[in-house]
Amino acid sequence: MTAPLLELRQLAVSFATDDGTVRAVDGIDLALQRGRTLGLVGESGCGKSVTSLAIMGLLPPDHSRVSGEVRFEGRDLLKETPRTLRDLRGARLAMIFQEPMTSLNPAFTIGNQIVEAIRRHSDASPAEARAKAIEMLRLVRIPSPEKRVDDYPHKLSGGQRQRVMIAMALACGPDLLIADEPTTALDVTIQAQILDLMRGLRRDTGTAIILITHDLGVVAEMADDVAVMYAGQIVERADVKELFARPEHPYTVGLLGSIPKLDRRRERLPSIEGRVPDMSRPPQGCRFADRCPFVEPTCRAAVPALTEVAPGHLSRCRRAPLSGLLS
């Protein structure tokens, strides 16, 4: 297998607060090959978005501490200068932020914002950059792109603004695209169109994608591999088909069990009882122990290691494999 495009080694991110140091991301390891999609899933506050911002070098240096390694094509981005990171962002690394209305500048047209990104990373003239911006709007299926290029963000629907963000992210042909909840708050028709667009772009350009979401249906449709996060840690990692067929961490079992099923419409959906631990005072042992139906005393003694329970399938659970417990 070729070397991964992106590799995280013991990446950790903490924030100093009035209540103490919050360990938002606590020593995660991930790898992503070119042309593949990694689904990064978990409930709100588990560290997904902080991980993406750490990769992009967008965390505030005065208020956060980042350690470990973020290796892109073998080079550790955490050791690069701010100028080098600015050169990489937009050109080689791109991100679709979660809320397009707050990510787009309301004082500038969408065309100006796409043109700015193109000219920052190429020698294109203003006319060439504008033509490229129109081409990108057409690629993401914005109707009448020659006219809409001069529109301000407030004139576009939520789905169209999200497509503009995708166009801007892809304008310079990045090798890695991080999509943070790209279909949040969109109706199912627009959601399907955006997912289809991302699939086509990955197929046509070979762009690797990190898809951050809490929607397991989107993960099943889009991802090649899945990493499940809980309380700042990776608790399970596997091929998407393997994970859906044989989940090996109780948290993943709970997430999959909460998905509505057509053949169980009259049954009450199961829920994961309890609350996420306070990450300024994380528990000594397994961070899911207080909510786990399979907990035993040894679970609270020390943090379980992420171990292989099947070929290519890793789980952070002392009792994995869970097949006997789930039957």
Image (spheres, grey):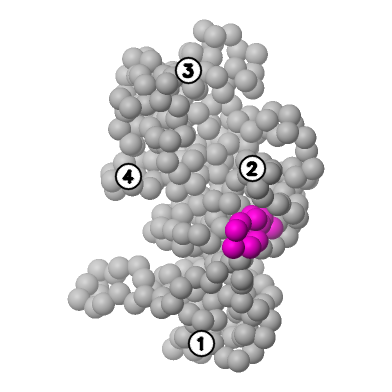
Sequence-first disc among 4 and 3: 3
Name the residue at the front extreme: 18
- Where is residue 288 drawn, in percent x and y? 54, 76
Mark 4 residue element: loop
Name the residue: 69% across, 43% down: 61
What is the distance, in whole Å, between disc 1 and disc 4 at their CAs?
37 Å
Q: Quadrant of residue 219?
A: bottom left
Name the residue at the left extreme: 266
Sequence-first disc among 4 and 2: 2
Sequence-first disc among 2 and 1: 2
- Which quadrant: the C terminus? bottom left
Query: Badge 4: few (under 14), some or many (20 or more) residues near its Cα, within 10 Å?
Result: some
Q: Which amino acid type is marked by label 2?
A: Pro
- Where is residue 90 drawn, in percent x and y? 60, 31
**Which is more foreground, mark 2 or mark 1?**
2
- Where is residue 203 drawn, in percent x and y? 52, 40
Q: Which amino acid type is marked by label 4?
A: Leu
Question: Can residue 65 be seen here?
Answer: yes
Query: Badge 1: few (under 14), some or many (20 or more) residues near its Cα, within 10 Å?
Result: some
Query: Which residue lies under the disc numbered 3?
Result: 112
Residue 186 shows which numbered tag? Answer: 4
Q: Which amino acid type is marked by label 3?
A: Asn
What is the distance, in whole Å, between disc 3 and disc 1 at their CAs?
55 Å
Q: In this view, does 181 lie to the left or right of 51?
A: left
Please provide the residue range marked out in magenta: 12-25
- Where is residue 75 drawn, in percent x and y? 78, 43
What is the distance, in whole Å, between disc 4 and disc 3 at their CAs?
25 Å
Query: Which residue lies under the disc numbered 1?
Result: 294
Mark 2 residue element: loop
Query: Badge 3: few (under 14), some or many (20 or more) residues near its Cα, within 10 Å?
Result: some
**Which is more foreground, mark 3 or mark 2?**
2
